[in-house]
Amino acid sequence: MEFKHKSVLLKETIENLNIKPDGIYVDGTLGGGGHAYEVCKRLSSKGRFIGIDQDEDAIKAATRRLLEFEDKVQIIRSNYCDMREALADIGVYKVDGIVLDLGVSSYQLDDPERGFTYRVEDAPLDMRMDRRQEFTAKELINTYSEMELYRIIRDFGEDKFAKNIAKHIAAARAKKPIETTGELTEIIKAAIPAKIRMNAGHPAKRTFQAIRIELNKELEVLQNSLEDMIDLLNPGGRICIITFHSLEDRIVKSIYKKSENPCTCPSDFPICVCGKKSLGKVITRKPIIPTEEELVYNSRSKSAKLRVFEKAQQE
């Protein structure tokens, strides 16, 4: 299956990166190389681009896509949480810009074998972003306790029927292991009242999102990596992050805000005595969202939000 993915908020991301032709830029979620291609087009012969992704199919697709820029491109198979170490291994310690697109690619969603989709009945329950990882969604669904399942569906899927869905999963797997996305989808449907199912989106969407986030530790990786990525930026460098649900967006917004104003002094103190200095400024007071035009040709961009942070000119 060909790796296809429409880059979301492409124009807005490239504009907000403020690309310097001789700069060093990193895409921590390389995917098919859509954002990367536009960055590379704007780099001089002295510029440098590093693409990072944990998905083998994405690495292959991006390598083909960026072939014409091979003299300035380096692609690394890794998770962006290891960005500092991966860059240090190739002698890079500071960069001028970082891009993260935290969405699941269209390729991953549309390839039944990857197990991300709830629209195919006999697909394996997989959902691993990095297939070198052994633990899959099938193991998660069949080994997590009912209480653990309830927690992740409630917290990561924000589904008000989380308790009932977890209860139905536990009852079903007691009879036989849950093997496919179709089996799981039917179990979820049975846990949600028919009246609700008729008037809402796909009943399995939130649970599948929750399982994917837990399996790949997506929020944990973002929470633990973002401050480190801001630290990697040169003065005036920018980080552009595209999120697709409120949990991710909340983390990005919170860490940007803390980086802009890290002061921990009580609000009634006349001057700052904690000594913590601002790391830079939030460029996007409100997130940038897709235009009506983009929504027409890429419906999957609907929930996308872009937030941008700029490193202070003087460290």
Image (cartoon, helix red, strand yellow):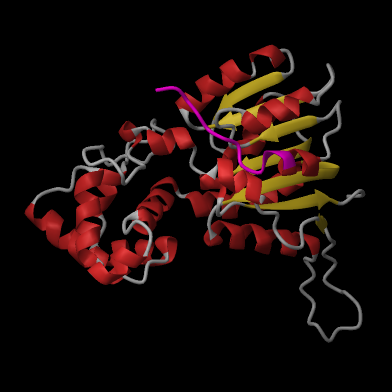
Which residue lies at the image location 67% right of the left edge and 61% below the top edge? 253
Which residue lies at the image location 86% right of the left edge and 32% below the top edge? 20
209 and 290: which is toward the camera: 290
Instruction: Give the image location of residue 59, x and y in percent.
Output: 53, 24
Residue 227 included in the magenta stretch of the image: no
As displayed, is residue 56 above or below residue 294?
above
Q: Is residue 274 visible in the rendered structure shown here?
A: yes
Instruction: Give the image location of residue 295, x and y in percent.
Output: 58, 48
Which picture quadrant has residue 188?
A: bottom left
28 and 292: which is toward the camera: 292
As displayed, is residue 82 above or below residue 51?
below
As displayed, is residue 187 above or below residue 275?
above
Left or right? Give the position of 280 relative to 171: right
123 and 173: which is toward the camera: 123
Left or right? Give the position of 70 relative to 19: left
Left or right? Give the position of 238 relative to 127: right
What are the residue bounds of the magenta stretch? Answer: 1-11
Instruction: Give the image location of residue 273, x and y in percent.
Output: 87, 74
The outermost residue toward the left is 175
Residue 10 included in the magenta stretch of the image: yes
Which residue lies at the image location 60% right of the left edge and 63% below the top edge? 250
Q: Is residue 150 visible in the rendered structure shown here?
A: no
Magenta: main secondary structure equals: loop
Instruction: Give the image location of residue 23, x and y in percent.
Output: 83, 29
As displayed, is residue 24 above or below residue 301?
above
2 and 20: which is toward the camera: 2
Quarter occupied by the N terminus: top left
